[in-house]
Amino acid sequence: MHPHDRRSLIAGVLFLLTFVSAIVGAALYAPVLADPGYVLGSGGDGGVIAGALCELVLIAANIGTALALYPLLRRTSEPLALGYVAARIVECTFIAVGLLSVLTVVTLRTSAGAADPGAVLTTSSALVALHDWTFLLGPGFVVGIGNGLILGYLMLRSRLMPAWLCWFGLIGGPLMSMSGVAVMFGAYEQSSVWSALATLPEIFWEASIGVVLTVRGIGAVRAAAATRSRVAHEASARSTGRS
């Protein structure tokens, strides 16, 4: 198997892993983010801790996609390939800060004791607000520049992805980033229909990267295996003929 095909396969699998870990993590985080009274409630925090673990997997997979693709993308433009790696790191920094804010709510919940409920609620709300801002600025803004505009251009020029798919990144990325700016200025809520519509092209683009690179990599693995089998069969036939 050619090293380029191996890297494509790894990047594709990691892209798919980012989707799974992000979706599962968001679902497990929901009680903290959606219920203002969570910090004063009772019960276990296992689901939220599991969500934090998913976020750690997401961070690792995000950086892994950039590292796997860098040797392939730098042939097109080394500065932009480095820019993509940097964008992934910045995105993961925002994710990590949001992760810490949620885990701090969990700590506050377990150690609140006889503390003033009003103060606890205020602190918890501030931490949730911090998480919301990190989500807007990281996955909601930086991703549009990194995964959308930069990666879309590099994939188009390197022909690692079909050209028509790359345009979803080239258009969807800036659209997603502009939507993030609109949310910052209060044009609409981050959870609004307008925000969702602006995000859809970028989501489709990232999903297509995972699917295309994984399928292409699996095809390369099968082709390499078939070649090895054919060579072994021919060698065996020649050996039998000489005897």
Image: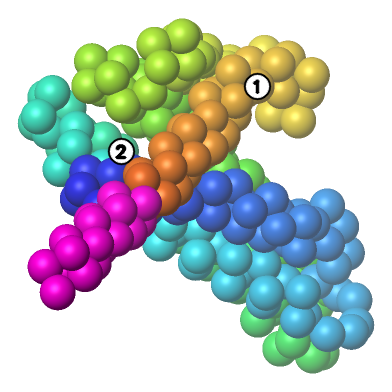
Give the image location of residue 36, x and y in percent.
84, 58
The residue tagged with tag 1: helix, strand or loop?
helix
User: In terms of secondary structure, what is the magenta stretch mainly?
Assistant: helix
- Look at label 2 and name its amino acid: Ala
Give the image location of residue 129, x and y in percent.
65, 48
User: Which label number is shown at residue 200?
Assistant: 1
**Vertical order, 163 against 59 (above or below):** above
Point out the tag, 1 or 2, that comes first from the N-terminus: 2
Q: Residue at x 26, y 35 (%)?
A: 84
Task: Kindly indicate the quadrant of the structure image that contains residue 144.
Answer: top left
Task: Give, as a single range, the part of the protein colored magenta.
Answer: 225-243
Task: Kindly indicate the quadrant of the structure image that contains residue 50.
Answer: bottom right
Residue 1 makes an appearance in the image: yes
- Look at label 1 and name its amino acid: Leu
User: Which label number is shown at residue 87?
Assistant: 2
In the figure, is residue 110 to the left or right of 93? right
Is 50 a magenta residue?
no
